[in-house]
Image (cartoon, rainbow, N blue to C red):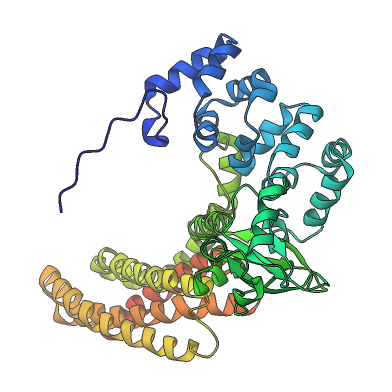
């Protein structure tokens, strides 16, 4: 099958981050510096809100604030929902309460909550007081749910119909009712208490005759999510059951909102990013953070690493006499510790991911531990042979090579076990394994690596 070359986009069409050239970025910078409001409006015309948010994010903080203040109400409300948390906080400070209230009213309810939840309580209340009562109560109900819950993610715009309606009545309702979501693929069927009893796909409504009853199209094997469900669990449900949307219910099982796949995509990206950052010991750091914020965020982890490095050094200090008698020990001992650290990180990464996706549970953790023990043993033997031969050839000492090989086996087995047992133990203790595991695993592999190598050397070489 042949593929034709992609067409050149029409003038003014924005392709996203790939189209954000240095020249275009510099042009926007100059417009902000010149306080050219009309020029900025033209530059942002027909641009997607996510791309506008990205461009504003890349500006220096002072220019960013200047642009937002200059654009005022002409900045698309959806841009605020696209900002990262730290950028949105700064952006909101540059906008007055009237503009904020107008912005919130134009957003879908889920995006409005996304903007409001980052404000301090006093500012949020001031903005909510400027919003009509009905809209304010809807937003307040979402804000009353715990942070990172399904209730915070849901949008309150959805389509619900009774089971006794016909397809014709439903279509007329969809055509005549103004206060409906702009995009939807599913209609929820509810009983008189507003409890969802099934779902009907929009495609089925469009393909059916007007006289067909909605109850005959109803699917009752749908997934209902409680409003206080953690957002990570929501993402797992969407992935497991291939959901496009899901109804959200309150404690009385009444339908109060809906979560759509686009919101879940953001959750998946955010959670994956958080785990990667935490494994690296940088918390929720972003490239837009200032020098002081970045340094302050990293110093605590570096301090903890310094303490663990001191612990490893104390182990080495126990064998200072052996190291003085054989310089080769000082040359070779980093090999054992380094291999153990890398092996432990491999196991740790797989374990943290398994815990996050719930692939690793209590029912199978023993089997996975035994598997990792076996992997550590096999890799230990393989690299023991390689390291042993290297040590023997390098220093022309067979016994030294054997000591290096034995230490390699011990440390790779211990690294594999530490890489799974430490995060599992932290998880059961209610501590996020992505945050604390790496430091403990590194400490274990360093201490055991040095202890095994120098201990065996002291026992068998002197």
On the rendered image, what quadrant is the C terminus found in? Answer: bottom left
Q: Nearer the viewer, residue 4 or 386?
A: 4
From the viewer's perspective, is 202 left or right of 1? right
Snapshot quadrant of residue 393: bottom left
Q: Nearer the viewer, residue 191 or 459?
A: 191
From the viewer's perspective, is 406 left or right of 351? left
**Residue 135 location in percent, x, y?**
82, 46
Snapshot quadrant of residue 62: top right
From the viewer's perspective, is 407 left or right of 284? left
**Residue 18 location in percent, x, y?**
36, 35
Q: Nearer the viewer, residue 164 or 461?
A: 164
Q: Nearer the viewer, residue 354 or 246?
A: 246
Identified at 57% across, 80% down, the residue is 425
Identified at 37% across, 31% down, the residue is 19
Q: Is residue 199 visible?
A: yes
On the rendered image, what quadrant is the N terminus found in? Answer: bottom left
Snapshot quadrant of residue 315: bottom left
Q: Is residue 431 visible?
A: no
Q: 31 above or below 130?
A: above
**Residue 179 location in percent, x, y?**
73, 47
How many numbered tags mark residues here?
0
Q: 283 above or below 319?
A: above
**Residue 47 location in percent, x, y?**
49, 30
């Amino acid at each position: 099958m042949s593929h034709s070359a992609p067409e050149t986009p029409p003038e003014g069409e924005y392709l996203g981050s790939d189209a954000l050239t240095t020249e275009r970025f510099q042009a926007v910078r100059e417009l902000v510096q010149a306080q050219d409001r009309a020029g900025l409006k033209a530059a942002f015309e027909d641009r997607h809100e996510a791309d506008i948010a990205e461009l504003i994010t890349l500006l220096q903080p002072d220019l960013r604030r200047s642009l937002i203040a200059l654009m005022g109400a002409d900045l698309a409300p959806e841009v605020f929902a696209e900002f990262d948390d730290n950028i949105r906080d700064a952006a909101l400070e540059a906008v007055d309460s009237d503009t904020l209230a107008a912005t919130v009213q134009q957003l879908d309810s889920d995006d409005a909550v996304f903007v409001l939840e980052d404000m301090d309580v006093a500012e949020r209340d001031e903005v909510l007081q400027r919003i009509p009562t009905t809209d304010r109560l809807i937003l307040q109900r979402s804000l009353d749910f715990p942070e990172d819950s399904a209730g915070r993610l849901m949008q309150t715009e959805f389509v619900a119909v009774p089971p006794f309606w016909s397809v014709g009545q439903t279509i007329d309702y969809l055509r005549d009712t103004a206060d409906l979501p702009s995009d939807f693929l599913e209609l929820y069927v509810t009983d008189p208490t507003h409890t969802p009893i099934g779902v009907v796909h929009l495609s089925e409504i469009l393909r059916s005759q007007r006289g067909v009853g909605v109850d005959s199209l109803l699917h009752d094997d749908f997934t209902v999510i409680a409003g206080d469900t953690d957002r990570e669990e929501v993402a797992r449900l969407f992935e497991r059951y291939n959901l496009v949307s899901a109804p959200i219910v309150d404690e009385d099982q009444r339908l109060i909102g809906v979560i759509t796949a686009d919101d879940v995509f953001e959750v998946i990206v955010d959670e994956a990013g958080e785990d990667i950052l935490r494994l690296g010991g940088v918390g929720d750091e972003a490239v837009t953070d200032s020098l002081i914020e970045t340094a302050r965020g990293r110093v605590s982890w570096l301090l903890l690493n310094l303490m663990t490095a001191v612990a490893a050094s104390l182990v080495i200090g126990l064998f200072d006499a052996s190291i003085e008698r054989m310089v080769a020990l000082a040359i070779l001992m980093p090999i054992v510790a380094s291999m153990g650290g890398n092996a432990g990180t491999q196991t740790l990464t797989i374990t943290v991911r398994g815990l996050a996706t719930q692939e690793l549970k209590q029912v199978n953790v023993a089997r996975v531990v035994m598997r990792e023990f076996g992997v550590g043993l096999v890799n230990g033997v393989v690299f023991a042979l390689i390291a042993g031969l290297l040590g023997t050839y390098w220093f022309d000492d067979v016994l030294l090579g054997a000591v290096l090989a034995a230490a390699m086996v011990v440390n790779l087995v211990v690294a594999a076990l530490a890489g799974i047992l430490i995060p599992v133990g932290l998880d059961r203790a209610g501590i996020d394994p992505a945050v604390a595991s790496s430091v403990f695993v590194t400490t274990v592999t360093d201490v055991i690596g040095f202890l095994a190598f120098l201990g065996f050397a002291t026992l068998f070489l002197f």
